[in-house]
Amino acid sequence: MSAAEVDWDALHAEAKQVMRLAYAPYSKFPVGVAALVDDGRIVTGCNVENASYGMTLCAECGMVSDLIASGGGKLVAVVCVDGSGNFLSPCGRCRQLLFEHGGPQCLLMTPAGALPMSEILPWAFGPDQLP
Ligand code: THU
């Protein structure tokens, strides 16, 4: 799917909505993410922190869990936002998650426009590397 075919405003609205549900009492840095799946579904997630800081679940983890628990499929387009609703650059671990479930062509919205995961995580290790 090309970037022009994606309803980015709808994804942005869903990401901001789920961001408001984040559990981030430690960092006070809520994150929300919404993604379009190849069957037209929208899946979402927010960050869920923990008193044992290292156990924090990023918003993308929740979104991938929603993806799998609601029937699976491939991520086509992703919008990740911070507490102000600005586009957020996913952390390294979450780039790997997005690559696993979206592949190199999955689009991520950035302040510079929609970019493919092949640019967000160049020279990626992924499912194709395994026999
Ligand atoms: N966070 C995410 O949810 N996703 C990212 O890609 C970057 C960071 C969360 C983790 C933590 O709860 C807070 O943002 C501050 O790092």
Image (spheres, helix red, strand yellow):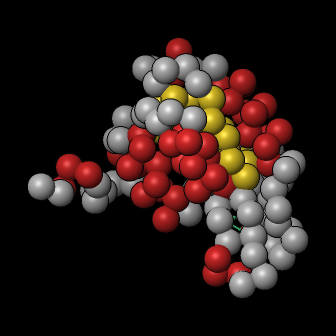
Residue appearing at x 28%, y 59% in the figure:
125
Specify the quadrant that holds the C terminus.
Answer: bottom left
| Left or right of residue 59: residue 108 | left
Residue 33 sits above or below residue 74 on the image: below
Residue appearing at x 54%, y 48% in the figure:
64
| Left or right of residue 110: residue 39 | left
Q: Nearer the viewer, residue 42 or 87?
A: 42
Residue 124 seen from this side: yes
Residue 60 seen from this side: no
Which x, y percent locates residue 80? Answer: 66, 46
Q: Quadrant of residue 33?
A: top right
Which x, y percent locates residue 9? Answer: 72, 24
Which x, y percent locates residue 36? Answer: 56, 29
Residue appearing at x 68%, y 30% in the figure:
11
User: Where's ligand 1: which quadrant?
Assistant: bottom right
Q: Quadrant of residue 55?
A: bottom right
Q: Quadrant of residue 52?
A: bottom right
